Image (spheres, rainbow, N blue to C red):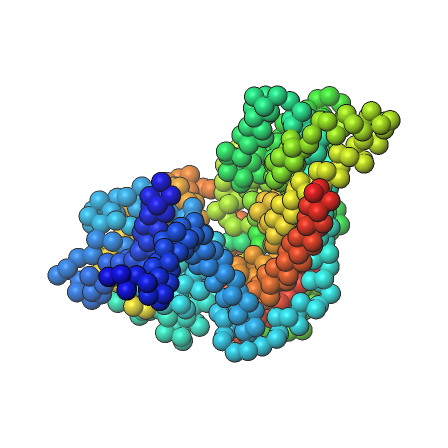
Amino acid sequence: MKRILSGVLASAMLLALCACGGGTPAETTAGTDTPAETGAAEASTELNIYMWQQYISDQVVSDFEEANNCTVNISYMSDNADAITKLTAGGGQEYDLIMTCDAYMESLIAGGYVEELDLSRIPNSSNINSSYWSSPNHSIPYLGNYIYVVYNTETCPIEITCYNDLLDPALKGQITSIDGARNLFPMALVALGYDPNSENEEEIAEAYEWLVKYNENVVAYGNAEQNLTNGTASVAFTYDGNASWAFAETGGEDSPLVVAPFTDDAVQLGFDMYVIPTGAQHTDLAYKFLDYICDPEVMAQNLVEFPYFCPNDAAVAAAPESYRNDPSKDFDYKENVFFQEDVGDALTIYNDYYQMLKVGQ
Amino acid sequence: MSTRINDTTDLQAISRKRDLRRKTIPALAQAGPVSVWMILFVTLPMLYIIYISFMSRGVFGDVVYEFSLESYQTLLDSIYFKVIVKSLQVALFTTVACLLLGYPFAYYIARKPPAVASKLIMLIMIPFWTNSLMRLNSWLLLFQTSGPVNTFLQWAGITSEPVTFIYTDPLVMLGLVTNMLPFAVLPLYSTIEKLQNSLLEASSDLGANPRQTFFRITLPLTFPGIFSAVILVFIPSLGIYTVSDMLGGGKVLYIGNIIKNQFGSIRNWPLGAALSVLLLVITGALIFLYTRFSKLEDMEVV
């Protein structure tokens, strides 16, 4: 009996070992069967995308799968930095398209981590408004986000017209805020009258002091739309897409929410863009996908589900009324925006102060 | 043939073979899978963490393989000290709360007939069939400003304004205690169950009142269970970050959150690794203490 048991256990162990050892190489070789640049001759059947969760319509993806007879595998990131890690650690082995944001593009291009794009293979890219397209040779902007202030006129004790109003002691425990060093610090820098992409440590330190006061008014980081609709917070510093849901939840046009009418302060407009990582395995499908997502009709369909800011003019024109008249997009300082730029080595300074902000209470 | 058998070296070889069959192979089969598992998934990652903690960080959060003590120097900063003290306090509170709630409950279960006891134990386990994030989310929904708890309080006239429960320390504590309670109840139950009634009867025969019996007999005899409960609750609640992340709204940070942030948004892997090493040291010290105590206890019991 004992001997049988030991035999069974030993073989189970061996099997487990084989499984462990065998799994990964098999996966990687599967990818190399279809060499990168063969194009139409040997079409890929698999497209691997790394992007934000809750950011693309399932229907849009499955339509693409059907049309091109392929499978699209989407993995989700939880932070922009995750995408950077993937890209710098040879992302082409695993992914054919990676979503990143404009703040990192310069370093990524300089480091040779992204492939140069052949725009003639993406004819629909002509629909993209060039003023929102920071690096047209290496990226295709997907959707963008204003990061602005929304508040509930019924419950918020004050009127908010600039970032400094957010420090008002009356707002203690009233703000629900997005998180992340490169989202919070630019707001503070603008409020203090500095360059939102400052690389000057003294300015960043001052912004840190500003954010410490801001932090006292924040009830929670994240979940902005929920906290705003269930009454936990009366002010949100959030993305326009999330605000759009909050507006819809609280009665659309009749919603007590308003986008804070800023008079002078600039708001952040950030874009999420697709890049092809260096050494991607299925570039033929990646190009097809990029062209597909730039198609006005496809993008318009996507916008119904994910009502973010869209840099694709033709798609906005094709989008339904509900998107174009969305109260979350109804504010008149849309031109007064700033972008996140690559701050190079100063990123470490930001991260250190951000760490202090999060820890030191 | 006969000369060969008499040969001592051959005999030794045969007995060695027998040993191999009788002892080594079964031993390998029994301990082997676990050992391989532990080496692959515990020891190696742990060594890697220790190794990374002595490296430097790159701008993008990549690990630069150059020796540096920077992470450990950062640890000496007073902010981290504060966070660690705060996390230890919270873990301690959770442990004490779990013991105070769990001990009477375990005692109650253990004194029931086995059929009832197993059902009661099952009741503790049932909530754990649901994902812990789901359970945390349900706390949020229950306690949110427009949630059922607030609605009830206002309806009953206990408060006129909604009370802010969510994203506060007490709710994080509640989440931690409910998450950790079974880890306290189960070891306590198993020791209390072994407690012999005759000892308690003897104690009362000798004139001890129930209070004296409890403190002099029951409590010391169930000490091993209490200690395992302490270890099982304290260590996970020191490192857990999901509870404070979800119920604390990203404002309540413990050491687990700091470590998670270092590997996530802040991207300072060496510092995250150094913090993990610190956590390992604290855990190791506790387990060392535990082995000392439990040995002492065993000797007393014998």
* Position above or below: A342 against A45: below
Image quadrant where one finds the N terminus of chain A: top left
* Position above or below: B74 against B181: below
Q: Residue at x 56, y 64 (%)?
A: B273
* Position above or below: B150 against B74: above
Q: Camera-side residue: B52 or A68?
A: B52
Residue A354 rendering spot, x and y as whole percentages: 62, 62
Quadrant of res B208: top right
Quadrant of res A128: bottom left
Is residue A57 among what the camera can see?
no
* Position above or below: A69 against A351: above
Q: Camera-side residue: B155 or A296?
A: B155
Quadrant of res A195: bottom right
Residue B26 rendering spot, x and y as whole percentages: 40, 50
Q: Camera-side residue: B122 or B157?
A: B122
Q: How many marks?
A: 0
Q: Residue at x 50, y 54 (%)?
A: A146
Residue A123 rendering spot, x and y as whole percentages: 24, 59
Residue A71 rendering spot, x and y as whole percentages: 25, 49
Image quadrant where one finds the C terminus of chain A: bottom right
Is residue A307 among what the camera can see?
yes
Tell me if B242 is positioned left or right of B23 in this view: right
Q: Residue at x 72, y 62 (%)?
A: B81
Residue lying farthest to the left in this orientation: A41
Q: Residue at x 62, y 45 (%)?
A: B232
Tell me if B212 is positioned left or right of A286 in this view: right
